[in-house]
Image (cartoon, coloured by chain):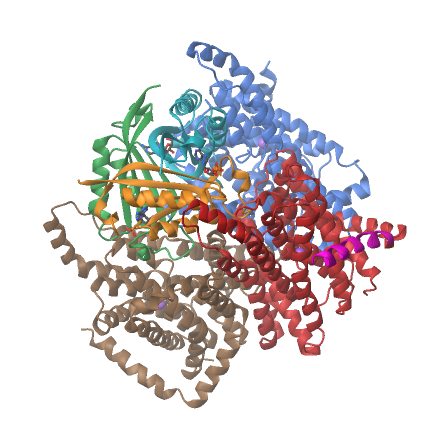
Chain colours: A orange, B green, C cyan, D blue, E brown, F red
Amino acid sequence: MQLYPLKLVTVVGETVIMSEIAKEGVELGASGYTLSEVIGHGSRSARNVIVTGASKTMKCEFVVPMDVAEKILKHVSHNYFEHYACIAWLTDVQVVRGQSYIGS
Amino acid sequence: MQLYPLKLVTVVGETVIMSEIAKEGVELGASGYTLSEVIGHGSRSARNVIVTGASKTMKCEFVVPMDVAEKILKHVSHNYFEHYACIAWLTDVQVVRGQSYIGS
Amino acid sequence: MQLYPLKLVTVVGETVIMSEIAKEGVELGASGYTLSEVIGHGSRSARNVIVTGASKTMKCEFVVPMDVAEKILKHVSHNYFEHYACIAWLTDVQVVRGQSYIGS
Amino acid sequence: MFTLPLALLAGWMPGMMAVVSAEQIGRVLESLERNLLTPIPLCFVLGLICTQIHGGIKIPKELYLSIAIFLLMSIGFIGGHELAHEYHEHGVATIWKPALATLVLGCVTPITSYVVLRYLCRFSIADAAGIAAHYGSTSAVTYAVANSFVEQTQHPADAFLPTLVTILECPGIAIALVLGAALSSRDRAAKARSAGVAVRESKLGEALYEVMTGQSIMLMAGLLVIGFVSTLFMDAKAFQPFYDFFQSKGMLFRGCLCIFLLEMGLVAGERLGDLVKVGPALVAFGILMPLVHGFFGVYLGHLAGLNLGGCTVLGAIVASASYIAAPPAVRLTLPEANPTLSITAALAITFPFNIAFGIPIYFEMAKLVGAT
Amino acid sequence: MFTLPLALLAGWMPGMMAVVSAEQIGRVLESLERNLLTPIPLCFVLGLICTQIHGGIKIPKELYLSIAIFLLMSIGFIGGHELAHEYHEHGVATIWKPALATLVLGCVTPITSYVVLRYLCRFSIADAAGIAAHYGSTSAVTYAVANSFVEQTQHPADAFLPTLVTILECPGIAIALVLGAALSSRDRAAKARSAGVAVRESKLGEALYEVMTGQSIMLMAGLLVIGFVSTLFMDAKAFQPFYDFFQSKGMLFRGCLCIFLLEMGLVAGERLGDLVKVGPALVAFGILMPLVHGFFGVYLGHLAGLNLGGCTVLGAIVASASYIAAPPAVRLTLPEANPTLSITAALAITFPFNIAFGIPIYFEMAKLVGAT
Amino acid sequence: MFTLPLALLAGWMPGMMAVVSAEQIGRVLESLERNLLTPIPLCFVLGLICTQIHGGIKIPKELYLSIAIFLLMSIGFIGGHELAHEYHEHGVATIWKPALATLVLGCVTPITSYVVLRYLCRFSIADAAGIAAHYGSTSAVTYAVANSFVEQTQHPADAFLPTLVTILECPGIAIALVLGAALSSRDRAAKARSAGVAVRESKLGEALYEVMTGQSIMLMAGLLVIGFVSTLFMDAKAFQPFYDFFQSKGMLFRGCLCIFLLEMGLVAGERLGDLVKVGPALVAFGILMPLVHGFFGVYLGHLAGLNLGGCTVLGAIVASASYIAAPPAVRLTLPEANPTLSITAALAITFPFNIAFGIPIYFEMAKLVGAT
Ligand SMILES: Nc1ncnc2c1ncn2[C@@H]1O[C@H](COP(=O)(O)O)[C@@H](O)[C@H]1O
Ligand SMILES: Nc1ncnc2c1ncn2[C@@H]1O[C@H](COP(=O)(O)O)[C@@H](O)[C@H]1O
Ligand SMILES: Nc1ncnc2c1ncn2[C@@H]1O[C@H](COP(=O)(O)O)[C@@H](O)[C@H]1O
Ligand code: NA
Ligand code: NA
Ligand code: NA
């Protein structure tokens, strides 16, 4: 069973920006993404705006090679960190048939 | 606080196969699993079938020792990767009271 | 792009205790948390009590420095592991602008 | 100290049996048929069957929760509306006695339950108190089904029954939890000392507050006040659409009850497998205790002046066990209690027993004690 | 071996065309207008438009699921209620022939579909069988819309039509899946051997069982029995609120159908882009096959003694394709079949075609074959 | 440049105060009682109380969303239905003036709001524009409650009011966002240059398009057309169940409004704590601005020929602030605006003020200006 070392980029932030971040991740080289609804609390969570009827926070995960991970984190950090409630981190993962997630 | 090094196996795929994968993971030696509904996009996401009224993609996580992780990944890879939209990866984790998740 | 090495603490357990655990995590030093609804199965899942109309299991994630991670895991382990269905683990992560999640 | 309730319990059971003559059994069977072959219990049965054959019916939890909210609001609103009329005509004259009787029943039933469970069935302190908290409280859906039943038999219950449901919701849970916490506190203190770690302070106060301000109480009591106030201040025509919406004889209430009972059948069906695990003592408890409590309810209701329908419904709600408010409260305050026991008893034994057999039996009991 | 259905197909089409005179086309157009300019199809159109302009309408999936549950329960309950009356008056005399005709149609339509798809449209075995499974089954919402249509034209369908919907649900899926599994099993066995790994055992049995105990069948058949039994055992007044709630001519059913069709429009609209991918052969199949199956339904319905409304509705349900029960079953048993093909055909071609044009056409067909 | 609206604002306020005599205050108080002691506002109060005592009422977000969808569809459908009658009888003669007046109000209110917020309350450009976007748009639920109020007072509003709600939804948000983007663009460009990184291109166009094709507009305008068309083409009997379902005087609409207001109370209650944070200037703005805008609405409505109920309702919707369409649009286009300010003002100040006090006040204003 061959496993490929790749990076898992996780971004958690306000719902209003998350589907954009997902799309932008794919533009920056991710082969796909996995979004989920969460309940978030942080230093700026009072700024969350969807007042009712929707989850206020979402999580987005990308399995990508290191260079794409860097690009996504830079992009998110520059464009969203100042004005939106969000957090992003990187984890080392071993991916099955990982070649299909590189450079696509 | 003693922590046990174990593996976290994460499988994301079409809803139609995920509860089976969860059950099969337990058969292969996992002491349990954690399933969640997600929104997925990938190279084959157009194939997702539940047309409406249900999440199309789910995520399944197993905390297991290495040998069980290998078995689960092999099983998923052989039986589901060809025809179903899915992705699977492995992460190193440190588990509290980890002995209870070994060999059960 | 500077990344800070921090810990990701993940706790999965009965819904009835999870919002408390989230709050207690913040009291122990986490700058925030990310909660989500999951479907869980484990050795004690029959004990889950919310009979219907609610998810029975939730997942809570904290991005924290090692010392806070230790405190949270110890607290959860001492107070909840005996009588409640739950599991907790630690992952190494690299966090963007990680300084804001230290000592807050 | 606990001999009185035990003696009472031991006394009523054979007494009740003796009184039930062949003729009454015939009438019970007839009632049973009339009760069982209607959509509400049949939907419960459909749910049960579905789980047994692993069928695919899935009620989204949001639909279940929405219907629960509607039913609670409806019970409260129509209750407030009818209370306003009753109050307008009779003041509190007709109401205070049944209210007092209900309060007494709410305090007695957790104790009878605890005593039987601890000393007859030999459960641990925590388990006995945990189950007693469920049987001390009540099930709003059992109320709704009992109310439908008596309306169908042309013996509608007194106007203020929803008020009594609201009164019965809390005290039983509170008493059982306090009892359990007090009796098991010595054990825990010892354990904590030996473990040498800081143990989570008792969640009792918090849990009691959560029970008293829980969704069931807030919605029923809140809408009761709203129904009361708007009946007094609005003219009848403007009030009508609200009445039509919440009306418990109306199509929305009855129809939603069908869907709700279907889901209850699905949930109870999934618990049927646990009947083996919980043992025969709890199964017997889950059937006999409601009969005893039901008789208490019917009898005190009659003494307090309720009519035939009212006695039946009071019997049914006293006999019923909570499976919404009680479980999380017990889980938080008595974590060592096994929730499988209490939930299986309340949901897979007592609830279906009451829906199918209990309600017609309380109806016959009510006739027996002379209610009209 | 397959020449008969092919000949039939080739024979009917021009025949039907020839028979359809200018006058009939005029009447179809008039029906179309009367049909299309009503809230139910217009809501579907609104959904379509919304997706095309990337509008913001979002129906929560739980609302969609809840309405689906309500519609299925309603079809079953009212079906059981009317079946009870029919049975009371005529026994099974009027029912057995249409039931048999429906069963025959349920067995024939997956085979005609498979043959056309495999030998005319040249799809792979798995794809042909997968699509055939969808067209062999039926769509409960198409039934509901067809039923509304005939009621609006003052030609209500026979009382037992909901029973026929229930009969038509399963056999077609089962036959197509067994066909597909049998025909593609040789391929797979070879592949498994060469790969040298343990291949997942066939999921066929499991999938068939899941189809037969799926939500649609359980709710429709279950409520059919409940409606039947309660009609016989309850007095009319007690039955009324349940009838009002589920009543298919009533405001709840019609209103919920509007919201449901809006969501269907949103879902179908998202699939419109796939029309290019699936190719012209499948588009033609999605329009012509329903016309053929619809005619089968109308004709056999007439032979079995159905009235004008009944023939129309039977035609519509035979012509309709399943998009709820079939997709997961096909996905599990024939994983190599491309789900985009079957779902696009069923949902983005056949469903809107039937709603907008098919139903009025089957109505005219029914008149043509002499139904009254 | 901004002196005119400022002068207008400064002028109206004391003027209005002077005109409001003791007798009128008495009538307002009476209206208030008649308005407040009805289920809809009382459910809002129950929600508020529940949050303050940390009670357990939880309305699933899917129920809230489903009711919102139903209310919007209902407003649109019944609006289209009554517009069809109006159009049939009078053509566009009665409609074009109120429509124009509404459009003018939709363009004026974001500007008055911006000017007051920026120059009187001294908010930043982004914050002022963000809040102005909320007050330039409207709240469909405030419309529904105002409409219930005037129907209860036997002064139903003109038939085409729902059309006016639809007209009022968008322009205000668009104008405020364009204003905010234009005024703050210079700042941002400078910042981007100094940071030396590619800044996300403006999301303005995207956000404006999303507002104009948002759920509220699509459902209201879509169902307006559907209601209009089906009224013209269907016979009355077939139309009836749809009318009954969506009917705004009916039990479903009124009942759902109760549940919706309960949830609004819960949401507003959670924001009450923020009142301290946002400061007294915004609290004053949230109460006085609606009074001014409400008077604009009542007055122009009267000039445009609306009846007493119509003037009241137009006043209420002009006075109301959006908390559904505006927030995400503002968040995307003016990210530096603090959403706590705008949402607290719209939801925790203006909404409850309008529901409880505003609507009866606009009713008296309408009488004052001579509407009948
Ligand atoms: N220390 C943390 N651990 C886990 N999640 C966090 C943490 N801090 C923030 N978050 C998540 O990130 C979102 C935005 O955080 P913030 O920008 O701090 O308001 C929150 O809603 C949480 O879901
Ligand atoms: N690069 C990726 N990062 C994160 N999740 C992915 C990625 N690619 C695929 N997925 C997930 O895996 C599912 C199946 O992917 P695929 O087989 O590529 O269609 C998708 O629906 C996503 O949820
Ligand atoms: N091996 C495992 N892998 C992933 N999740 C687990 C595992 N074991 C338990 N869980 C999760 O932890 C919860 C409590 O587990 P337990 O205490 O074993 O009943 C379960 O409901 C699962 O969600
Ligand atoms: Na009880
Ligand atoms: Na078919
Ligand atoms: Na406004």
In the rendered image, residue C77, in percent from the top left (x then y), is placed at: 40, 22
Q: Quick one: which residue is furthest to the left in this view?
A: E194
Quarter of image, res E365: bottom left
Residue F148 at least partly seen: no
Q: Is residue F326 left or right of residue E344?
A: right
Residue nearest the viewer, comparing F92 with F17: F17
Tell me the magenta residue range: F1-18
Instruction: Inspect the magenta stretch and tell me whether residue E324 lies in it.
Output: no
Name the residue located 34 percent from the left edge and 62 percent from the top edge: E343
Q: Quick one: which residue is furthest to the bottom in this view?
A: E22
Quarter of image, res D168: top right
Instruction: Inspect the magenta stretch and tell me whether residue F9 lies in it.
Output: yes
Q: Is residue E240 left or right of residue E173?
A: right
Q: Is residue D325 left or right of residue E177?
A: right
In the rendered image, residue F150, in percent from the top left (x then y), is placed at: 75, 59
- Check the image and report above or below for D158 versus F18: above
Residue F114 at least partly seen: yes
Q: Quadrant of ligand 5?
A: bottom left
In the rendered image, residue F305, in percent from the top left (x then y), is placed at: 76, 70
